[in-house]
Amino acid sequence: MVFAFASIFWSQAPALTARRSAALGMTLLFGVYFASRFSVKEQLRFLAWGFGVCILCSFMFELLGLNPSEGIPGWYGVFYHKTELGRNMTLSAIVFLFWKKVEPEHRGLARTGFLASVVLILLSRDMTSLVVLVIVMALLSYLQWALKGRSLRWAMAGIALLLTIGSFSVLWVTAHLEAITSFLGKDPMLTGRVPLWILSSVMALRQPWLGYGYSAFWLPDETYVQRIWSILKWEPPHAHNGFLELWLELGVVGVGLFLLVFSRYIIKTLAFLRSNSEPWAAWPATFLLFLFLANLTESCFLVSNSAYLILYVAVAATMYKSRNEIGVRTTTGTLETHCA
């Protein structure tokens, strides 16, 4: 956050970067409030009900023809593109899985929500989201097995291996999507990502260390953006890769700082899962793994007013709060022992 705000000093659009950084700061504050005000159980309940409304409205919009797909096969639901529907329903399916655990009295609703989420992923015909869901569920099963009485180091090595395989799977599916899903129709958003990544990387190499400034690269009036759009024959609003988008905006320094913090919280969530028996204990690690995979083909790491950023901050704040609670319990136990 501080580095994004500091990019005002080298941004090619300082005023825009300042406004977007302020919005980013407000999003981070809301994430902290969300984690401090509500327990994880309550957070999952709110998310489940919110996604439930999205599911109902998505079916209603499509069945009533309120959100036409402009000739591209696949449902959009209440979102502006089918990839948005697919990605959000992937997170929805994960949320309903955990809601079933934390509030078993709503097991029936949770199962219905999970199945409806999967159905909408299939109806969106977003192959990448389906692959991400399968990988996340496989990682979740591995997490719950590997961290029970086993070495955290070996568990992390296995997760890193599975995550690497999963990442290459997502990227391979994305790169070969036209051949794999030719029945989906010609959608440049699905088939044009690799050329976009190449062109974006070329532009990132022009200002590799500090980037162009937060939210200051994809400016429609810039000549280089118009050239990229002209070559691609479609107008992407971002790089369709979270890491590449960070490189464009904040350079190698920004990417390095983000990965350092992100890796730290991955380790914290895994350690928390290993030492905690709460039914939601795997939620923080699972969400971070989902966020990592989702950003291989989309850009939703540091996006202001984004539910993904709010949940990322909420996970980080939850880990901080849990550490403090453990510290308080440890101190209290030590004092009681000395008093006895």
Image (cartoon, grey):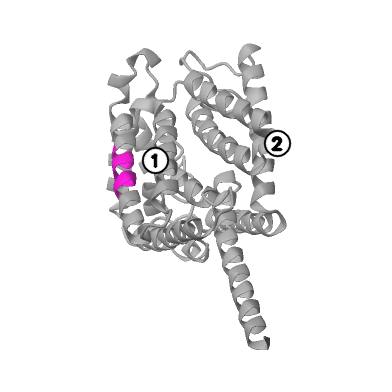
In the figure, 316 relative to 236: above or below? Answer: below
In the figure, 289 relative to 338: above or below? Answer: above
Residue identifier under label 2 = 105
Residue 166 on the magenta span: yes
Among all residues in the image, which is located at the extreme bottom?
339
Q: Identify which residue, 13 or 304, lies in the foreground.
A: 304
Residue identifier under label 1 = 225
Give the distance between the C-alpha atoms of the residues marked 2 and 1, in whole angstroms: 52 Å
Residue 204 on the magenta span: no
Q: Which residues are magenta?
A: 161-168
Q: Report the residue at 48% width, 46% height from top.
A: 286
Q: Report the residue at 38% width, 60% height from top.
A: 152
Circle 1 — which element? helix
Position of residue 153 in the picture relative to residue 331 (left or right): left
- Identify residue type, mark 1: Val
Q: Characterize the local packing of mark 2: few (<14), some (14-19) or many (20 or more) Cα atoms within 10 angstroms.
A: few
Coordinates of residue 155 in the picture (x, y in percent): 35, 54
- Identify residue type, mark 2: Glu
Q: Report the residue at 67% width, 23% height from top.
A: 56
